[in-house]
Image (cartoon, grey):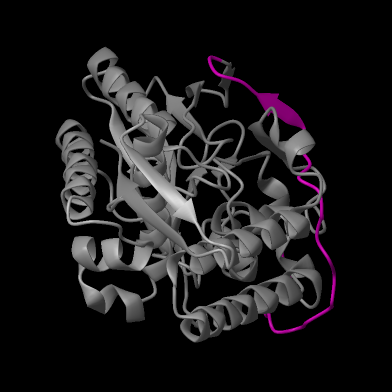
Amino acid sequence: MRTLEAKPAKIFPVNDFIYRITLPQPFYAPNQVYLIRDEKNMLIDSGYVESLGMLALALRELGLSMNDIDILFYTHPHIDHITGGLLWNTYAKKTERWGHHLMPQDIVDYPDFINNWQRDTARILTRAFKDKQARATRIRRSNERWTKFVKRFENATTNLTHLSKPDTPSSTQNLTGKIGDRAVRLERLLKNGDTFSTGKLKWEVLETPGHNTWHLTPVETTQRFAFTGDLLIGNIPTIYDDFDGNLELYQKSLTILLDLRKKYPQMRFLPAHGEEISQPERAIKVLQKTLGILENGLLKKLVEGRKDLVQLLESAFGTKIESGGLFIAALELLEAILHKLMREGRVGSQIYEDGYEEFYLKH
């Protein structure tokens, strides 16, 4: 996990209503949080908890305080999208938090949700490594990273009280030890097809699962913008098939975006990571093709005989990925593809007593 650096947030005006605020986070590429300035002010996602002070300062630069935000819209509950919001209500009581209608009942305790995520990481490392020492080292390092996060979330966090009120000093160095919500609390439960207005802008909600069970895509139908969260980004998103994702649903959600573009040919796609998707149809088709290439590559490699996840990973991405920050994400993606092939009856697997797993072709 990278150490976050205290850099000013970058603010980019997309148009007269929409501002993109770029926030760092230690897990992946920086987050794009979107401010909608209308009769009601709305934030789409809230970023990572330790970036909340930076987000508050960005709002101040735009002439707003945290209390001026009427709606906080969660695209999905991953760490880098929701944890700033879990602390939000400590400083800004009037903001309503909106998200998928099943999130509050499915995620009763967010730190426990993170612990389950940590356990899934340990599970896939156990499955992937035959060498028990290499496996144990990887799991220990992973656990250390997750433990640091949970401590950060549950213990000290930057005092933002002055940024939730107008005309107060802008220092963000005082640590208070306040704790955010452990539960995912929502003031409005959203379902597919729901509509709402922030004033001049009109919105429709699409349920787009696959990357995450509770993933939503808010679509603005007047100015023609779709905020794609992690469904469509500048790269292939991770799919945690054994935890909260599903490849088949993800592929269906990509088709939903293609249908949206057909309905609104001028629709612009704004992702949660990276720049605006300049050619949405092409980007989606390239992504679909890439997933197909990876799938075919796995099948060809399994023709040689039984393989584990690490061997398949090296075949697909090369050995250098094992030392990079995207190693777990790549393992999860390949496992999602393999699970899809298993559900189709084309691939089988054997899990040994120590948890190690090998995959093989079914003839």
Residue 123, image x and y in percent?
57, 62
Residue 9: in magenta span? no
Residue 175 in view, yes or no: yes
Quarter of the rendering occupied by the C terminus: top left
Residue 164, image x and y in percent?
74, 59
Q: Decide: is 127 above or below 226.
A: below
Magenta-drawn segment: 167-193
Q: Decide: is 158 above or below 23.
A: below
Q: Is residue 102 left or right of residue 300?
A: right
Residue 188: in magenta span? yes
Residue 22, image x and y in percent?
43, 61
Q: Residue at coordinates 30% horizontally, 38% vertically from top-left?
A: 362
Front residue of 110/61: it is 110
Q: Decide: is 14 above or below 126.
A: above
Q: Residue at coordinates 84% horizontally, 66% vertically from top-left?
A: 179
Location of residue 163 by image quarter: bottom right
